[in-house]
Amino acid sequence: QVQLVESGGGLVQPGGSLRLSCAASGRILSARNMGWYRQAPGKQRELVATVTSAGSTDYADLVKGRFTISRDFAKNTVYLQMDNLKPEDTAVYFCNADLLLVSGRMNSWGQGTQVTVSF
């Protein structure tokens, strides 16, 4: 069974930092594109950042210069370093991965981790 397990969310004051982690486990041959999305109450899920299997990154305009996505290929893990957090960054953050399994390709989502930015 393939799982994406996220960690690192929590409550932080404006201007603070958090680091999210997402580890893919199971019978995985490799993780291709990996990324982070977020969904605030009453809003649609939106892209935050992605990183390809070649290490190329892409960011939503709202987080450029503040968030950094990275990955550990050996551990099939993706990270999101979030600095200078703002109240509008409050959302549930979801990990997404395009995985290559023995049985074929699979796109998988994590369960989500809450990030709250508030005094």
Image (tube, rainbow, N blue to C red):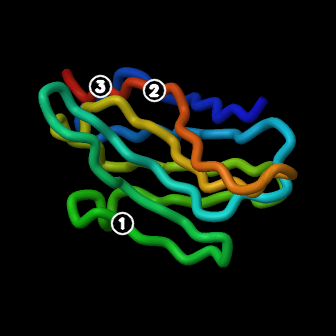
Q: How far is the residue under mark 2 from the one under mark 1?
A: 19 Å
**Element carrying mark 3:** strand
**For residue 56, which quarter of the picture?**
bottom right
Q: Are marks 2 and 1 in contact (CB under 8 Å)?
A: no
Give me the residue at 50% from left, 49% from top: 80
Q: Residue furthest left?
A: 42
Residue linked to disc 1: 59
The residue that disc 2 covers is 113
For the residues carrying marks 1 and 3, which lies nearer the camera in this image? Answer: 1
Label 1 sits on what residue type? Tyr
Q: Which mark is residue 116?
A: 3
Residue at 29% across / 25% down in the picture?
116
In the image, residue 92 sits, relative to residue 61, either above or below, namely: above
Secondary structure category for the residue under label 2 = strand
Picture coordinates of residue 21 (x, y %)?
Answer: 60, 39
- The type of residue carrying mark 2 is Thr
Circle 3 Cα neighbour tier, 10 Å, few/some/many (<14 / 14–19 / ≥20): many
Determine the image quadrant of residue 2.
top right
Q: Vertical placement of 10 versus 98: above or below? A: above
